[in-house]
Amino acid sequence: MATTPALRTPDALLTAVLEGVQIHDLGRPLSIGMPQSPNHPAYWHSLPRRHGDMVRADGGSAANDLISMGTHVGTHIDALAHVSQDGRLHGGADAFEAGIGGKYMDHGVHTIEPMVRRGVLLDVGSAHGPEGCAAGHEITVAELEEAVERQGTEVRAGDVVLIRSGWGRHFADPDPSVYRGAASGVPGVSEAGATWLADRHVHAVGADTIAFECLRPGAGHGHLPAHRVLLVEGGIYIIEALDLDGVAAAGAHEFTFVLSPLPLVGATGSPVRPLAVVSGA
């Protein structure tokens, strides 16, 4: 007589899930016309084949898709190949020579290992009221330290630190230029704030804005010192256009952060769908 095999003891993660872990999706939906930097090719989706275009003899049919987009559109991660300074990438590599052959083999997004790390949310926006930071507001070191103190959330080496300004509320605005903030400016971390993060040897940083750092009214993306500090000098990845409102509303300032870029060999970035896994205990 056959017997039913004994169930395996669930591993720690599965046990945690069964005990009520909350998973917050930090990625934005990808859709035609969504707000993005004008520096990158826009997202486009089409159906080359729809149901009924070709029907098999048994009545079955299949549809398929074609997608085109830049790698820095929607929620995405910047690889170290994304920014150079004075002709040099992180570690001093010659930026021109690194791109010969059309691929950044040493600094491309395929070199970013999947992340399962301690995540920290610094909810700076909540200190500015229900609307969050104003357009063009520069987030200072004092504000980052105030968030750490208020939340009791220490920033440690190897962490992924996410900065919520509150500007993410504009992502779904019918006018995509509002989130882009070309005329109004966009709140973000100052150069000194980026240095503060780099001095703590974090693994990656992220924000609910289009460029992580502060964009001044009318200045666009012409001056990005925090990118230099983080990507070139610090070797720290940047994640942009995150949805941080849900995890902030849940009061989750510390969690397991999960992210895996697409292994696009030699690319300067990748769309991502990060998760914040929060213990139910």
Image: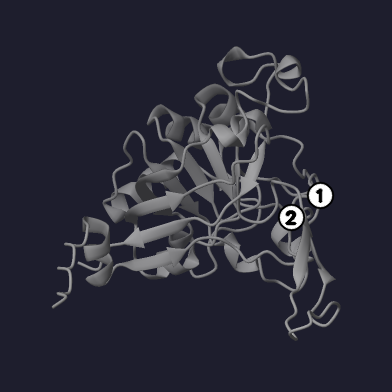
Task: Determine whether 154 is above or below 55 in the image.
Answer: above
Indicate left or right for 116 with 164 as reference: left
Marks 1/2: CA distance?
Answer: 9 Å
Instruction: Check disc 2 and give the amino acid type.
Output: Gln
Instruction: Check disc 1 and give the amino acid type.
Output: Pro
Q: Which mark is residue 36?
A: 2
Q: Which mark is residue 103?
A: none
Q: Residue 189's spot in the image, x, y percent?
A: 55, 43
Q: Which residue is mark 1?
A: 41
Indicate left or right for 209 with 114 as reference: right
Identity of the residue drawn at 63% across and 14% down: 93
Q: Residue 226's spot in the image, x, y percent?
A: 59, 34
Indicate left or right for 120 with 187 as reference: left
Identity of the residue drawn at 78% across and 23% down: 101
Which of these two is toward me, 57 or 188? 57
For mark 1, give the secondary structure.
loop
Task: Determine whether 12 is above or below 80 in the image.
Answer: below
Indicate left or right for 274 with 218 as reference: left
State the scheme by which the image is colored: one colour
Which of these two is toward me, 50 or 277? 50
Task: Determine whether 160 is above or below 124 in the image.
Answer: above
Residue extending farthest to the front is 1
